[in-house]
Image: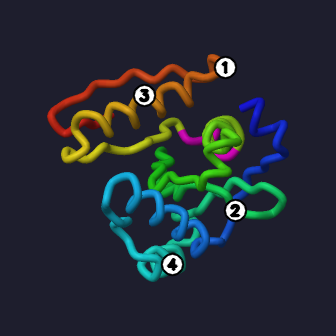
Amino acid sequence: MAQAKREGLSVAETEEYAPFWAILTENLVARHQTTPVHSLAEILLLHKLFPKEIRLVGVFKDSILIGGCVVYLCKEVAHIQYIATNAMGRDCGALDLLFDTIIHSYYVDYPFIDFGVLCRRWRHSASMRVCSFKKKALEAEGSITIRTKLNSEQSW
């Protein structure tokens, strides 16, 4: 996270769904040969119908979106989905700053922050890398302890 701060990254809720969806789609195609479950048009419609419950939190460098995630808000849960950064975001530690801000600033009133379920088809290498990444990112600086239990569907 220190690197993200040195680089001058900032985190903010944003309406920049199109640039984020481009980053997300590029990542999913390149790394997993798939696309987001929702199309850009679908997520825009869902956000329009539920603007208080569906939010995009972005990471910015010099006002340019370099990563972020979609957050679905329920009564007690902030569910994080569609996490992605571009190459600059990966190089600058954007996700560390994003998760720290979400946990300690944006959604502190939510008793649960859910980072989601991993797909069965990613069962071995990819899901383990994602689990490891999420756990390391959240445990950085001793801010939170994550306990994981991997069942047949590789879920948290």
- N-terminal label among 3 and 1: 3
| Type of the residue with mark 2 | Leu
> Based on the displayed image, in which of its 4 quarters is residue 130 positioned?
top left
Q: CA distance from mark 3 to mark 2?
A: 25 Å
- Foreground pick, 31 / 62: 31
- Foreground pick, 96 / 49: 96
Image side of residue 24 versus residue 39, left or right: right
109 within the magenta span: yes
The answer to whether 82 is drawn above or below residue 5 in the figure is below
39 within the magenta span: no
Q: CA distance from mark 3 to mark 4?
A: 31 Å
Judging by the rendered image, the residue that carries numbered circle 1 is: 141
Q: Are marks 3 and 1 in contact (CB under 8 Å)?
A: no
Which element is circle 1 on?
helix
The residue carrying pointer 2 sits among few (fewer than 14), some (14 to 19) or many (20 or more) residues within 10 Å by Cα, namely: many
| Type of the residue with mark 1 | Glu
Judging by the rendered image, the residue that carries numbered circle 2 is: 65
Q: Which residues are magenta?
A: 106-110
Judging by the rendered image, the residue that carries numbered circle 4 is: 44
Question: Who's the residue at 54% across and 63% down the image?
Answer: 23
- N-terminal label among 2 and 1: 2
Q: Position of residue 89 (x, y in %)?
A: 65, 49
